[in-house]
């Protein structure tokens, strides 16, 4: 019974990691995630594997749960790689937010980050403060 409950726990963790990875791959952001925290969980899975191997050396019975621990270790290590990758790009100043919104009835555009220029589907809306007509009107009002 304990092995079944441990397997259910590992399966639930595995599904959670799939959701986390899917979110990072679709948003291309690792906001709210800490690499140190994910690596601590990786270390926990390593300890789980080592405990099953220690049990095997004592009893001679190899638990099938070692496969689940190993799978979760691989999935979590991939998640850690994504956290590192997206945090590194955020540190380099590469924006990943794709939301561009215009307020109805006004000429003011909200600034938004866009993916690098190789993604032709993303339209970058310039800030109206950079619009020459707005600059001229501001200068004429100040004179």
Image: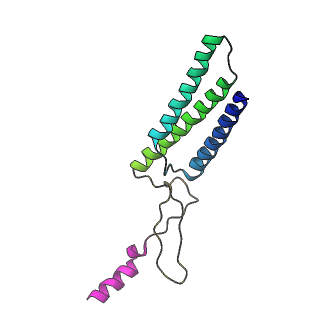
Between 42 and 53, the one nearer to me in the picture: 53
Residue 86 to residue 124: above or below: above
Q: Position of residue 121 (x, y in %)?
A: 58, 59
Q: Quadrant of residue 61?
A: top right
The quadrant of the rendering that contains the C terminus is bottom left
Residue at 48% in and 51% down: 32
Front in this rendered view, residue 59 or 110? 59
Q: Residue furthest left?
A: 143
The percent position of residue 67, horizontal first and vertical second, equals: 67, 25
Residue 78 percent across, percent down from the top left: 56, 36
Q: Is residue 130 located in the magenta-colored stretch of the structure?
A: yes
Residue sitting at x 46%, y 44%? 34
Residue 103 drawn in magenta? no
**On screen, residue 131 above or below 31:** below
Q: Main secondary structure of the magenta part?
A: helix
Part of the protein shown in magenta: 127-143
Residue at image position (56%, 53%) is 27
Residue 124 position, x and y percent, is 50, 65
């Amino acid at each position: 019974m304990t092995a079944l409950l441990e397997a259910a726990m590992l399966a639930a963790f595995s599904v959670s990691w799939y959701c986390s990875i899917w979110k990072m791959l679709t948003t291309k952001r690792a906001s709210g995630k800490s690499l140190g925290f994910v690596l601590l969980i990786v270390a926990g899975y390593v300890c789980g594997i080592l405990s099953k191997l220690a049990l095997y050396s004592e009893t001679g019975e190899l638990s099938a749960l070692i496969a689940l621990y190993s799978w979760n270790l691989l999935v979590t290590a991939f998640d850690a790689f994504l956290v590192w990758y997206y945090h590194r790009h955020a540190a380099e100043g590469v924006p990943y937010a794709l939301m561009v919104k215009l307020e109805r009835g006004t000429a003011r555009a909200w600034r938004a980050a866009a993916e690098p220029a190789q993604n032709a589907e993303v339209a970058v809306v310039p800030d109206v403060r950079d619009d020459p007509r707005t600059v001229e009107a501001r200068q004429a009002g100040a004179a």
